[in-house]
Image (tube, helix red, strand yellow):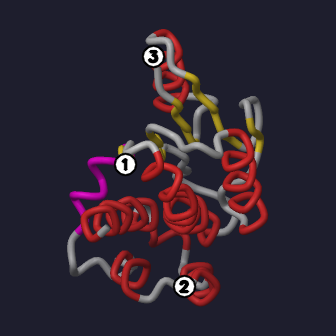
Amino acid sequence: MGVYIVTGGSKGIGEAAVKQLREAGHTVVSIARRNSDLDADIGTPEGRERIIARVRELFPDGIDGLVSNAGIASAPRLSQVLSINYFGAVAVMEGLFDLLKKKNGRCVVVTSASLAYDMREGNRYFVDNLLVNCGDEERIGALVDSFDRTKVDNAIYGSTKSALVRWMRRS
C-alpha cells in the first residue's frame, strides 16, 4: 500500500479523498488548519514549512501521492485566498516533489473549480497571469487587497484556481 498526503483533508472533497484512500488500505496524512492529522495553515510560509518538514520527518523514503485540495473562496483579506489557493499549494507541491520522485509516485491530484475555466480575459480582476508569471506573493497580495470587494465577486477565487491549473500544466 502507498503513502498519500491530502491538503484540505478535514472536510468536503479532501475529507472524502482521505476516507477513500484509507479504506483502500493506504497510509494517509490529512492536512488542514484544524481537525486533521497535521494541523497547519498552508496560507502562511510557516505553515508550509511545517507541513513539508513534518512529511519529510514521517516519510524520509518518499510518498506515493499528493492530493492538493486546500482552498477557500473568501477571506477577510483577498490576499489570503491567493496565499492558500495558489502560493500555498505550489509551495507544498514543490517542497514534496523530491519525496514523490523517491518512490516514483509523481502523482499529484489538484482540485480546481469549473469557475476557473469560465474566466474571461476582459475581467478587470483577472490576476492568474500575475500569479503564474510573477509569483511575488507579497506584491500580488497587496494589489488584490486594494480591489473593491463589491466588484471582485468570485474573480479572485477563479483566478487562483485557473493559475493553479496553468502551473500544473507547466510543471
Q: Residue type at mark 1? A: Arg
What span is colored magenta in the figure? 109-119
Q: Earlier in the sequence, mark 3 or mark 2?
A: 3
Q: Which residue is mark 3?
A: 20
As measured in the structure, the alpha-carbon distance from the residue carrying label 1 to the one carrying label 3 is: 19 Å
- Under tag 1, what secondary structure? loop
Q: Residue type at mark 3? A: Gln
* Residue at screen point 60% across, 69% down: 78
Q: Nearer the viewer, mark 1 or mark 3?
A: 1
Quadrant for residue 124, please give it.
Answer: bottom left
Give the numbered dot on residue 140.
Answer: 2
Which of 88 and 124 lies nearest the eye of the viewer?
A: 88
> In the image, 15: left or right of 131?
right
Residue 111 appears in the picture as rendered: no
Give the numbered dot on residue 106.
Answer: 1
Q: Earlier in the sequence, mark 1 or mark 3?
A: 3
> In the image, 88: left or right of 161?
right
